[in-house]
Image (cartoon, rainbow, N blue to C red):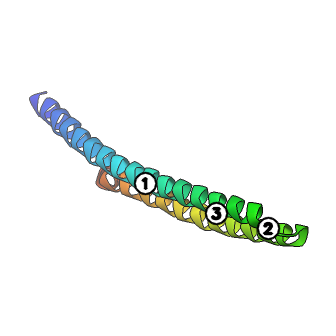
Amino acid sequence: MTQTYEDFSKYGKEFADTGLKSFASLSKGAQAIATEAGEYTKKSFEAGSAAVEKLFSAKSLDKAIEIQTDYAKQSYEAFVAEATKIGDLYAELAKEAYKPFESIVAKAK
């Protein structure tokens, strides 16, 4: 009976430690994602502001359309690149958060 209690206590402590390690990974990953999103927002705002300034200085309708087309293309490419980067960060976050539990799952099998 006491052996069972000691085993249960040991596994409970191990699981709590593992949970804390996983939480630390989650926090680190979430911070990286938030930083990346903030940088993208800043760059996107700056690019939009620059495009508006160019539009106001356009001398013809053709030039304004060209500026708008270039801005739309660059914005789309930047968004796709950023979405890919953020997706990779989320995948890495999931891997890192699960890593501490791998040993527990292996023991359970």
Q: Which part of the image, by quadrant, shows the N terminus?
A: top left
Q: Considering only vertical position in the picture, is 79 above or below 8?
A: below
Q: In percent of the image, x 18 and y 38: which residue is there? A: 13
Q: Which residue, as the protein is rendered here, is positioned at the far left?
A: 2
Looking at the image, residue 88 sits to the left or right of residue 49; the answer is left
The amino acid marked with disc number 1 is Thr
* Secondary structure beneath label 1: helix
Pair 1/3: label in front? 3
Q: CA distance from mark 3 to mark 2?
A: 12 Å
Q: In percent of the image, x 65 and y 65: which residue is there? A: 80
Looking at the image, residue 39 sits to the left or right of residue 15; the answer is right
Of residues 83 and 14, the one nearer the viewer is 83
Q: In percent of the image, x 58 and y 63: which residue is there? A: 82
Q: Which residue, as the protein is rendered here, is positioned at the far top?
A: 1
Q: Which residue is mark 2?
A: 58
Q: Where residue 8 sits: x, y (%)?
A: 20, 34
Q: In percent of the image, x 58 and y 59: which residue is there? A: 46
How packed mark 3 is, by other alpha carbons closer than 10 Å (few <14, some 14-19, many 20 or more), is few
- Report whether residue 109 is seen: no
Q: Which residue, as the protein is rendered here, is positioned at the far right?
A: 61
**Closer to the N terminus: mark 1 or mark 2?**
1
The amino acid marked with disc number 3 is Ala
Q: Which disc is residue 35 wearing?
A: 1
Q: CA distance from mark 1 to mark 2?
A: 35 Å
Looking at the image, residue 64 sits to the left or right of residue 104; the answer is right
Q: Are marks 1 and 3 in contact (CB under 8 Å)?
A: no
* Secondary structure beneath label 3: helix
Q: Which residue is mark 3?
A: 50
How packed mark 2 is, by other alpha carbons closer than 10 Å (few <14, some 14-19, many 20 or more), is some
Q: Which disc is residue 107 wearing?
A: none
Pair 3/2: label in front? 2
The amino acid marked with disc number 2 is Ala
